[in-house]
Image (spheres, helix red, strand yellow):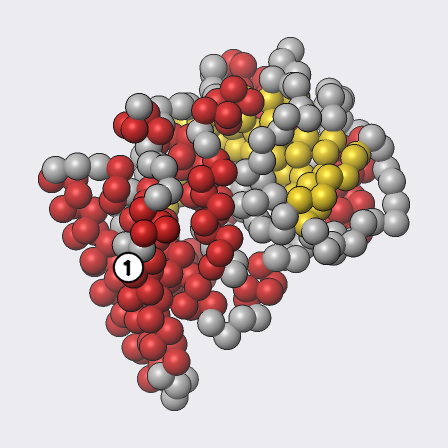
Amino acid sequence: MISYSIAIRTIGTAGDKFRRELESINRQTLQPDKVLVYIAEGGKLPDFKIGKEEYVWVKKGMVAQRALCYKDIDSDVLFFLDDDVELAPDSAKKMLDMMEYHSADAVGADVFQNHKMSLRNKGKAMITNLVIPHWNKEWAFKVKKSGSFSYLLEANNDFYWSQCCGGPAWMIKKKVYNALSMSDEKWLDKLGFAYGDDQLETYKIFKNGYKLGVIFNSGIINLDGGTSSEIYKNDKKRIYIRTKASFAIWWRSIFKTVSGIEKSKCVLSFGIKSLWLLLFFSFLSLIKFSPSFLTLYIRGLFDGYTMVHSSEFKKIPSYSIMRSK
């Protein structure tokens, strides 16, 4: 069995949810070599200790707290967790077994279960961000040319290959992680909230030729602490942040990684999505009697375009590591 260590990112406010997570780690049938908690500077250390967890102070940021060098970990696999998930006793072993059996480079746990959403929530995801289901049994999640993702409508197997996965619980071989230069994606933190960081990080695995899978029976539960996302949800400029981040992520991870006719297809796909959202936010502004929804969306697109053409953004190494070699 390959060895693994757990790396948790937190700002120190998950409380009882974080306690439950540490307790579930302590119950793992296959114990990790280390449990390292990367806590944001200025955060508050918990007043409890459950197992062998160790705390490391790092710069605050959803990407910054995960895109680290991990020189203090010698294990074969890095198991990334947010601070609000609870593992079944065999969750880590199941994921590692799947990784070995399928010769995968990375494996994510499906904790959001998009395919089990209510019809109302599926419709909401389609309308607000063109996130739609697909019937392609080859993939758990696909990243479309528009920048949105799609999810498998019926997951009848325990394992599927994937182009991206959720961020609360996923693992990757350390040698593969080191090859991907994840630290290059810290630019996303500068937007105030790293909207779309899960897709930005995990799509990079697939885009660079490595094999990513998703396991649907991991037993991992999302306790949804929402410690970071709550700040975003309460931000009046969240539409602006989302739009700007989405544009920059699309530009960097999709548009700039293809050439020829594929670029035109990406522009067309993103243009259709943008037009749809323009109509949606126009309608929202109309029924809410507030132009801010529309103006924030338009500003987000404009500033996203300006951002990706800035000299600072252009200095970021290519998303496609393989193409740049």
Q: Is residue 231 visible?
A: yes
Residue density around tag 1, few if under 14, some if 14–19, many if 20 or more, within 10 Å: some
Residue at the top extreme, as displayed:
1
Residue nearest the observer in this picture, 205 or 162? 205
Tell me where residue 315 appears, x and y as whole percent: 35, 44
Disc 1 target residue: 305
Q: Quick one: SS at disc 1?
A: helix
Label 1 amino acid? Tyr
Tell me where residue 114 appears, x and y as whole percent: 47, 47
Tell me where residue 25 appears, x and y as whole percent: 75, 32
Q: Is residue 194 visible?
A: no
Please state, as top left, top right, bottom left or bottom right, where the N terminus lies in the image.
top right
Residue at 52% across, 61% down:
192
Please state, as top left, top right, bottom left or bottom right, where the C terminus lies in the image.
top left
Residue at the bottom extreme, as displayed:
289
Residue at 54% across, 14% down:
100
Residue at 28% across, 27% down:
323
Q: Relative to 257, is 5 above or below?
A: above
Q: Relative to 51, is 284 above or below?
A: below
